[in-house]
Image (cartoon, coloured by chain):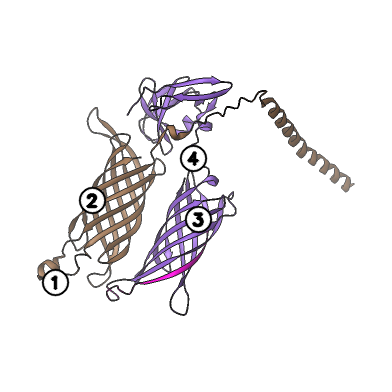
Chain colours: A purple, B brown
């Protein structure tokens, strides 16, 4: 995969830089401005440093894995550089790699969130997954699927929700959500009959929670959800769920 | 006297607070005027974006091996997994696997009696785990060396067996060799722990699996 053919032409154009390259083999090239940068043999701190690239030399940046970049020197040596080392290198016209290369979407500008959660629904273990679309800074729409596995029965809850997060700047940011969905309840087979007493009911839910932007593009959330199952019987069945969730945003 | 001191103090305080602010404001306006181009070239400077760099935080893999379903013998297991690498040490992984349970000793010895229907013998599971990498290198020979890692995993999930979904905790360890920038070979062993009451009383079962797999970074 080592393509060294790619070349960048940096042409100055009335104070503006334009970057052009061969269409297929375009690479991002940076100049080392520090005395040197260290190349590790793998994408982690524990891997040994086997080469250094000196001040003024150029490297091509090929791959990013977590916070490590694989670079290729002009002499054909490939190694991994930590993101913080690469941040100070010069991309073009005095601009550093750290300033120019947008590596992550800021928390407040996220579009999508994908996550999983684990917790308790009325005393039984609950697992869930969700995907949400942030359509304004404070409002998002989401789809949830939860499964609660109890000793007597199994509940599956599929729902859609609208969530409001009023204080996006807060480090621990509260949110409120309203949703609607369907609950399937299935009794455990060996205890009660043959399992043909499945019940399905509509449900409305309200949840409150706190989101914390952990690091990079990760979010931790604690949530309380109150589910009202609209059963055929006279009374509405109330279920309470507590979960801890982990999600990634893009 | 006190009031005079107080007003003097207030005056000094407001001066110290306001003066630097106005100084900064002046500075800013000066800078803005200086930076304003005489002729606007109307050329938007192209941002160097990360699309030129291949971002490989995800890993998709398939695996096959054996799973020992407690009381139901050792059986072949196949599955797939998707991992997301959070940093050099932590990763999260979603996996799905399926197997078909064999017969218990009781079923074999008693002749005709069957505890489960063929449909109930199908086992499938999914789990969500967090993993921790112990990064290292593996020296295959004097000149052949690959980056590798030994990892520990802990997760929760659901196992469908004998007609029911059961809450499952999985504990495991694995070893991966990174053959190239994109291609990985891995060996995993894990213990899928869940409760079942097929043989009368409810008991916690340990179901060990050993698998080998291939995966790709993308």
Instruction: Look at the numbered discs 4 and 2 and tell me whether their residues touch, using CB distance below 8 Å.
Output: no
Q: Residue at x 35, y 25 (%)?
A: A3
Instruction: Look at the numbered discs 3 and 1 and tell me whether their residues touch, using CB distance below 8 Å.
Output: no
Mark 1 and mark 4: Cα distance apart in space: 60 Å
Look at mark 2 in the image and give the residue it sits on. Answer: B210
The percent position of residue A39, horizontal first and vertical second, equals: 40, 28
Labels 3 and 2 positioned on one and the same chain = no
Mark 3 and mark 1: Cα distance apart in space: 52 Å
A71 and B52: which one is in front?
B52
- For label 2, the crowd category at 10 Å Cα-Cα, with few meaning under 14, some 14 to 19 and many 20 or more, is some
A170 and A249: which one is in front?
A249
Quadrant in the picture for residue B169: bottom left
Q: Residue at x 51, y 20 (%)?
A: A11
Q: Regarding mark 1 in the picture, which secondary structure is present there?
A: loop
Q: Residue at x 46, y 34 (%)?
A: B50
Look at mark 1 in the image and give the residue it sits on. Answer: B113
Q: Chain of mark 3?
A: A
Mark in the foreground, 2 or 1: 1
Look at mark 3 in the image and give the residue it sits on. Answer: A141
The percent position of residue B159, horizontal first and vertical second, equals: 30, 60
Closer to the chain start, of discs 2 and 1, is: 1
Q: Chain of mark 2?
A: B
Q: Which residues are magenta?
A: A190-210
Mark 3 and mark 4: Cα distance apart in space: 22 Å
Mark 2 and mark 1: Cα distance apart in space: 30 Å
Look at mark 4 in the image and give the residue it sits on. Answer: A104
């Amino acid at each position: 995969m080592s393509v060294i053919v790619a070349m960048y032409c940096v042409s100055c154009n009335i104070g503006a830089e334009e970057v052009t390259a061969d269409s297929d083999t375009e690479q991002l090239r940076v100049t080392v401005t520090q005395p040197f940068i260290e190349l590790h043999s793998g994408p982690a701190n524990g891997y040994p440093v086997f080469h250094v690239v000196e001040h003024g030399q150029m490297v091509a940046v090929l791959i990013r894995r977590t916070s490590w970049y694989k670079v290729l020197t002009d002499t054909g040596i490939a190694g991994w550089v930590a993101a913080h080392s690469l941040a100070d290198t010069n991309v073009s016209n005095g601009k550093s790699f750290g300033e120019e290369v947008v590596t992550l979407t800021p928390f407040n500008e996220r579009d999508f969130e994908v996550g999983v959660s684990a917790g308790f629904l009325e005393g039984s273990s609950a697992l869930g997954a969700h995907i949400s679309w942030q359509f304004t800074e404070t409002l998002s729409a989401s789809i949830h699927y939860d499964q609660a596995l109890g000793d007597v029965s199994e509940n599956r809850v599929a729902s859609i929700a609208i969530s409001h997060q009023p204080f996006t700047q807060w480090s621990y940011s509260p949110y409120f959500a309203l949703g609607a969905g369907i609950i399937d309840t299935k009794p455990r087979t060996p205890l009660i009959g043959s399992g043909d007493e499945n019940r399905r009911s509509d449900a409305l839910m309200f949840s409150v929670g706190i989101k914390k932007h952990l690091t990079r593009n990760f979010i931790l959330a604690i949530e309380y959800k109150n589910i009202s199952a609209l059963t055929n019987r006279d009374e509405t069945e109330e279920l309470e769920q507590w979960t801890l969730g982990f999600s990634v945003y893009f | 006297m006190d009031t005079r001191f107080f007003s003097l103090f207030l005056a000094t305080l407001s001066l110290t607070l306001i003066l630097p602010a106005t100084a900064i404001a002046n500075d800013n306006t000066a800078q803005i005027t200086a930076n304003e181009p005489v002729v606007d070239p109307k050329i938007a400077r192209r941002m160097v974006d990360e699309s030129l760099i291949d971002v490989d935080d995800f890993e998709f893999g398939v695996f096959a091996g054996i799973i020992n379903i407690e009381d139901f013998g050792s059986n072949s297991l196949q599955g797939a997994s998707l991992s997301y690498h959070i940093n050099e040490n932590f990763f999260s992984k979603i996996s799905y696997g399926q197997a078909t349970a064999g017969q218990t000793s009781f079923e074999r010895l008693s002749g005709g009696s069957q505890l489960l229907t063929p449909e109930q013998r199908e086992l499938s599971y999914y789990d969500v785990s967090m993993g921790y990498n112990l990064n290292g290198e593996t020296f295959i020979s004097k000149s052949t060396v690959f980056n590798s890692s030994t990892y520990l995993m802990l997760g929760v999930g659901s196992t469908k067996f004998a007609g029911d979904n059961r809450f499952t905790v999985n504990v495991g360890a694995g070893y991966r060799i990174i053959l190239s920038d994109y291609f990985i070979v891995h060996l995993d062993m894990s213990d899928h722990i869940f409760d079942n009451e097929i043989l009368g009383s409810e008991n916690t079962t340990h179901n060990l699996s050993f698998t080998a797999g291939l995966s790709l970074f993308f």
